[in-house]
Amino acid sequence: MSRSSPVTIQRNGVVSVITIDNPPVNALSQSVREGLMRCLDEAISDSDSRSIVIQCAGRTFIAGADIHEFGKPPEEPYLPDAVSAIEASDKPVLAAIHGTALGGGFEVALGCHYRIATADAKVGMPEVKLGLLPGASGTQRLPRLIGVDKALDMMLSGNPISANAALEAGAIDKVATGEDFQSTAVGYAEELIDAGPRRIRDMDVEPVDSALFDARRKKIAAKTRGLISPEKIIQSVELATQVDFDEGCEAERELFIECKASPQSSGLRHAFFAERAVSKVPGIAKDSPIVEINSVAVIGAGTMGAGIGYGILNAGCELVLIDNNDEGLQRGHDTIEDLYQTGVARGKVSDAQMEQGLSRFRTSQNYDDVGAVDLVIEAVFENMAVKKEVFGKLDAVCKQGAILATNTSTLNVDEIAAATRRPEDVIGLHFFSPAHIMRLLEIVRGSDTSKEVIASSLNFAKRLGKIGVVVGNCFGFVGNRMLYGYGRENQRLLLEGAAPEYIDKVLFDWGMAMGPNAVGDLAGLDVGYKVRQERTDLPDDPTFYRVANMLAEQGRFGQKTGKGMYIYEKGSRTPVPDPEVQEMINREAKRLGIEQREISEEEIIERCIYGLIVEGARILEDGIATRASDIDVIWINGYGFPRHRGGPMHYADSIGAETICEAISKLGRNPGLDYWELPNLLTNIIKNRKQFADLNSD
């Protein structure tokens, strides 16, 4: 037997123990599948072996298929064949699960005759999150084992369940107690010798009302919005109730191949890998020294500051919240308490965790109280003068080596750093609202920001449970710089004749989490207005954000005032079209000499999304983003770009640079403005027959 094989076998008395050791997560690569089949044959052929245990080394059971192989021609042995071979054994086979058994790993466990798990183990089928369905008999086995309803719950959510929940559902047979899990598993395998194999394929699916499947379709329709894999999962499980096992498996495989070949799965898999690539920052080694962050100060007790503070407390840090008046501090304190109460009510946080978190929390108006903290996060008004004043104070009181971070969403980090005598310690940590929920954290490196501070910020983002993406310093960085291109086209389309609710519906139906006009009302139209007032580089274009400016100047800030682009009834967040706003838009279009017309859905999508792509290409040209895929991560996690489309740059690759350039050539307008001038990067991609993905690097 080759020592290089990731699968080995040894006998423990009358039990053959097959061990998979393929770090880091024992993914089901071709070598693992081959080794598993080989060791299974050896165990079956061993006359002194009477039962078999399949276990894994390291920190987890099989955490899924090796999705790196998805873009390559499949190699034998195929996973469905391996699962079938396990089940066909005439000796009882036990899956010994620790860590996680996910996707193909759980399907391997279902191919076994019995399953035992550690108390902290989890099992699940997350394929839907990659635009797939369980393709190695999972949709046929799980309904037979735990019933259709519970099986659909697991497959359509993609979320794992605990060992105890799996035991209660019938997905596993035993939860192990004691420290020596391997010995417990071997002992259980010995007990199963007399019981013999118990094959799921021979079980009947518990009868269900056929109306259940349509009810499920209706239940998930609003969330899935055109995703094909949830529907394919329902179809496959429904077949399990209608045809025999082998016919169901054959249909499942065909549906799996359809999903795998779809642009949706390609986009979801791209997003999966892109989120794992963001931690690889050029010049920042894995073993870079970091600042241990255990105490944090947040300057500014508004909604953003309180949200940031709540996340910090949940991460186990000490927190001091600073504001310049008692009223602001009390509001911030109450907000954090309310967030904890809501977390407890929803089962996200325990009473003990709330009590511990609040015990690490204090408020103050005195900057001297931040002198000993490891990290300060400034979250005051988006005004350069105010921020520079704050950083001057921080420079005077903070200990040497403390990280000084600004939560600015648009302003120059270098200019803020210049207000201190330690620009190497200054960095941008751009949280997204609501800060305790949104996963994205833009980490903005200044010209002098040290590697240690960058590495520490990445580590801190991970501790907060966020995806930290390191970007360069320019107006708006990556996300908000691109947002201006997207929003600019929305604003211009309003003047050209597209109603706010029409634009929002088109882009929502296309996949955006919200339409741009609803987003503006949610964020507050006064926020963007104040930022634009500070800029000195705005284009000489009277249509540029004209509608948003007019609304802000009328005090129509959005949901916070009950009126913005839409009207909001008291206590409601549902936008209601306002005829007065449409009349205002029509009058302004006439004043500007813009002829209103009927605008197609296709034009709205092209102009708004291509506006993103063009600015994304310029950002890559300028070196503000390390990879095209980093831009995708930012827009998926911070701005509601549809995950199944993979982000704006992946979407550009999927439709082709030539198609985009042809459309852009027809969009040029307003002589003297460069909105639709083709970036050199885009033309070079066409010339060299490349894609944005080719610009990604480790």
Image (cartoon, helix red, strand yellow):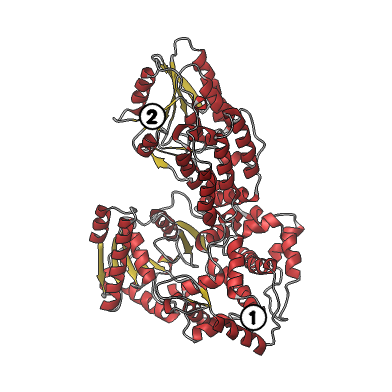
Name the residue type under label 1.
Leu
Q: Is residue 502 above or below residue 94?
A: below
State the image quarter where residue 587 is shown: bottom right
* Residue 390 pos. (x, y %): 36, 76
Residue linked to disc 1: 495
Q: Secondary structure at mark 2?
A: loop
Q: Secondary structure at mark 1?
A: helix
- Residue at screen point 30% across, 30% down: 177
Residues 421 and 464: in front is: 464
Give the distance between the C-alpha atoms of the residues marked 1 and 2, in whole angstroms. Answer: 64 Å
Q: Is residue 511 above or below residue 521?
A: above
- Residue at screen point 53% across, 41% down: 210
Work out whether mark 1 precedes mark 2 in sequence or the reverse, and give the earlier one.
2
Judge from the rendering whether residue 393 lies leftward or rightward of residue 71; answer left or right.
Answer: left
* Residue 424 pos. (x, y %): 43, 66
How dense is the environment of label 2, judged by Cα within 10 Å: few (below 14), some, or many (20 and up)? some
Name the residue type under label 2.
Asp
- Residue at screen point 55% across, 73% down: 517
State the image quarter where residue 497 is shown: bottom right
- Residue at screen point 58% across, 47% down: 231
Residue linked to disc 2: 173
Q: Is residue 243 above or below residue 361?
A: above
